[in-house]
Amino acid sequence: MTDATPRRIRLDALAFGGDYNPDQWPEEVWHEDVRLMREAGVNLVSLPVFSWPQLETSPGVYDWEWLDRVIEVLWAGGIRIDLATATATPPAWLVRAHPEMLPWDADGRRLEFGSRQAYCPSSPVWREHVGRMARAMAERYGQHPAVALWHISNEYGDHVARCWCPESAAHFRRWLEARYGDLDGLNEAWGVNVWGQRYTAWTQIEPPRRATGPVNPTQLLDFERFGSDALLELFRIEVDVLREVTPELPVTTNFMSLFRELDYWRFAEHEDLVTDDAYPDPADPHAHVPAALNYGLMRSLKGGQPWLLLEQAASAVSWRDVNVPKAPGRMRVDSLQAIAHGSDGAMFFQWRQARYGQEKFHSAMLGHRGESSRSFQETAALGRELQRLAAVRGTRVRSRVALVVDWDSWWATSATESLPSQRLSWLQQTRDWHAALHALGHPVDTVRATGPFEGYDLVVVPNLYVTDAAQAAALEAYAVGGGTVVVGPFSGVVDTTEKVHPGGAPGPLRALLDIEVDEPWPVADGSVERIALDGARYDAPVWTEWIEAGHEASVVAGFAGGVLDGRPAITRRSHGAGTAWYLGAVLEIDGLVAVMRRALAHAGLPARDRTDPHLEAVTRADDRTDYTFVLNHGPRELTLDVPEGATDLLADGVVAARLVLPPLGVAVLASPRASKPPFITLSDTTE
Ligand code: GAL
């Protein structure tokens, strides 16, 4: 097998199951588990994620027997395994023999053993041992027919995403040396003449620990890049071992949705299947909206390839301040939402609810009450229902809109306090822009700022603070080629070393937009500025900009009132058939909806006249069939106009042109593939 051969999960159905921790239970329970798993339709379980100490009881002394038996019991029941390399947490004996492998926080305090993930990502001892353990697991179980997938470590960066220990400091210096070549290069990149930061020896450089005042922003940005890379290196140690010992098996590591600390574009390059852990808060009636963005990211990380929801809660979690359970039907609609967005299954943390430990109040598929628990009844019903959706496995989401996600810009705008305003949030901007497109009826893919943009009619760039020439050229080529681009505030500001581009923003995006930003104009706390667009006024409560429009740019909207009264707020530049828009303000959702409505129309895309944030429609398709998932996330019935003659896979039977979805209701409409994906709207009869 060459590295180009796709390695697919060894499963011929949508995946359904959860994390399984049999080492927390007596052996007789395992048989009961498999009986109930079969009853619920479970076909895949993840294990043994945290079991290294039970598998290697002291250095070099292995106890495989219990795991051998678990695997046999599962396999005899026809259940496959997402086999963890068991390296999510080190055994106590390893930590005590090598206390230097414990991580440090930014204040230089060592974090103790007693929870999980008690390691410094750069520790050579830890790196050596994870490689050894992955090899031992692969040699022991890699040929077992039950193994469907490798599950490497667990949620990298969940507890320890950055480490400030001396080993990390040395690793950071090596990383900097590789990036900048020599100290002159580093001093130049970091702009050390400001505040007297010049370094004359590598040993003078430290990770950005708590300092006397604001730390050099480029040092902070590089530490974020380094921290992500350090965990990526750790991941790759195991990937390399598994590829060597079991080249035919696919590998994954479970992501944590849109997670600040790790550049998932880079992680995904090294895995075969993207998997995600998603915990939308049932207390938030709009949690499905950022969830849709997260899932858009997951399917986009490997170019639209199906991914897998590897963890979610059957009901409550146990790590929020208040852990609200999922009302009846919520878990079902949440699961079907992930599948709508390209997940080839729905998995849970965990199969059987724990009786002890940190997660005993975390729900599970099989609750404390066992078979009669509501979570078992509801998850088992979902398991049976998924069999009706077998045809969607392997199909891809049809999206015409892409949103740029750039970790450098996220890190640079959140690592430093030295900005025009602390109120501008990359994450909030990204979520709000997505929410506007979501409300207007579009599932949104994500994309790097360098593309690829082919196949999209609209590309939105909420906040590309760090911009380089390649990104600018890619966006420009897209617009020149006929695409519509919308660029948000505080974009094109700095280069990759955080130096303001010559002439200021939008730097290399100037040719695309034909504007200049004279000065960012953040809005004082408690104040609101406004823009006037299409006869309406929209609030800009956080951020505005003094914009000078060039000759090629037309002004679409201006500021209304305040110091910037009458000055451009939104501009548009034509590039032949394509256009590039700039929005120089942070708007609330209603304003963003108005802007996106204009942009969608310009791009030739439909938009819902009437919006309801609880309505979501996403189409997955193969060459012949569109499968349109229509989801009602809200508490009120929705009446929708849908294409006539489709079959609802969940309900049997042909659907009329007017579909009534009850609260938390879902329909999956199968219809012959159309040239454009079906566009679902609220019917006029909906109040
Ligand atoms: C995840 C983790 C699981 C479990 C779960 C609880 O972050 O991977 O092991 O702790 O959270 O919600």
Image: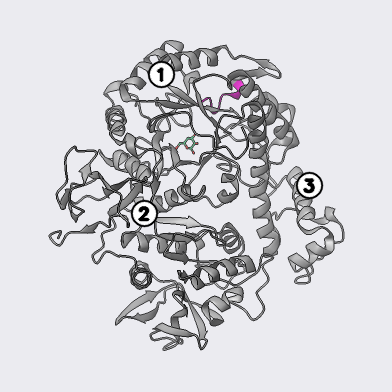
Q: Alpha-carbon neighbours of circle 3 within 10 Å: few (<14), some, or many (≥20)?
A: some
Q: Which of marks 1 and 3 is in front?
A: 1
**Labels 1 and 2 touching (C-beta < 8 A):** no
Q: Is mark 2 on a helix, strand or loop?
A: helix
Which corner quadrant of the image does residue 531 belong to? bottom left
Find disc 3 in the rendering and name its residue: 170
Residue 526, image x, y percentages: 42, 74
Image quarter of residue 383: top left
Mark with earlier residue (1, 3): 1
Amino acid on which disc 1 is placed:
Gly
Q: What residue type is labelled 3?
A: Ala
Mark 2 Cα-neighbour bin, 10 Å: few <14, some 14–19, many ≥20? many
Q: Residue at the spot x=42%, y=37% of the render?
A: 318
Camera-side residue of 591 and 369: 591
Q: Which mark lies nearer to you, 2 or 3?
A: 2
Is the residue under label 3 in contact with that under label 1 (CB below 8 Å)?
no
The disc placed on residue 78 is: 1
Query: What residue is shown at x 33% (from left), y 47% (from top)?
Result: 283
Q: Magenta segment, which residues? A: 47-53
Q: Position of residue 505 (x, y in %)?
A: 59, 77
Pointer 2: what residue?
Answer: 289
Q: Above or below — where is 16 with respect to 142?
A: below
Does 460 sit above or below residue 42?
below
Q: Which mark sits nearer the N-terminus, 1 or 2?
A: 1
Residue 285: in sight, yes or no?
no
Image coords of residue 662 (percent x, y)? 18, 46
Amino acid residing under circle 2: Val
